[in-house]
Amino acid sequence: MNIGKIYFLALVFLASNLGADCGEKRRAVKTLTDAGAAKVADLQHPKEVSIREMTGWHRGKPIKKSMLKLANAARLNKQEKTIYLTRGHLSNVKYEADDQGYHLILSDGQGRTIIAETVSTDCAAGSPFLEQIQKVQAAVEERFGAKEKFRRHDIDLAVVVTGPAFFDFAHGQRGHADNYVEIHPILDIRFE
């Protein structure tokens, strides 16, 4: 690849991400823009899983700072390579202005919670799942309002979300599972 082509691709990447701060920690994996995104299991045949099952998964060894570059580009385990469908009760929605996504807290009604997150289309530029990501972002905005700084509590709405599992880091997020597993990004959402 010549230097001109590399420069052009870098400019396209930067331009597509100017609207949002997409985060640094494992950004490519959580936006489905990593090299392994196209190999994530078929969206048409998601594996159904309960919140209880997800919160019981072993996340593997913690990622050290020295491993962060590899972790940014690689999926950690088979769960991060699989599309799941899970049902829960939506209890909280928060718009996150920094990455322009929505943070949803899902509960199984028995004290277990997970986070499911949308991804802005700016952050997901180049993802093979961009169309699904756009539809989910639009559905959440239609249901809860346009992009504003808001937080809605005590919603208690039955919801079905579909997307890959993602093991996040502890960073003070509300509603996290003990193992920090999430559905991230959400590729389909149904409010019931």
Image: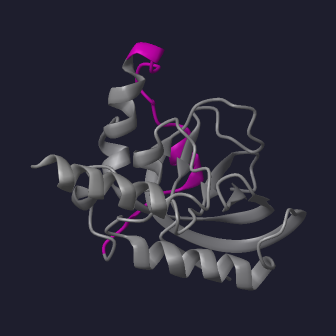
Q: Quadrant of residue 89?
A: bottom right
Q: Percent from the top left, x then y, of residue 110?
A: 74, 50
* 137 vs 143: above or below: above
Residue 75 visible here: no
Q: Is residue 5 left or right of residue 129?
A: left
Q: Quadrant of the C terminus?
A: bottom right
Residue 64: where, in percent of width, then height? Answer: 45, 15
> Does residue 162 belong to the magenta stretch?
no
Left or right of residue 96: residue 29: left
Q: What residue is shown at x 58% (from left), y 31% (from top)?
A: 169
When the figure is inspected, residue 93 is found, relative to residue 10, above or below; the finding is: below
Give the residue furthest to the left: 1
Q: Measuring 11% from the left and 49% from the top, which residue is drawn there?
A: 2
Q: How many marks?
A: 0
What are the residue bounds of the magenta stretch?
45-66
Q: Position of residue 153 (x, y in %)?
A: 90, 61
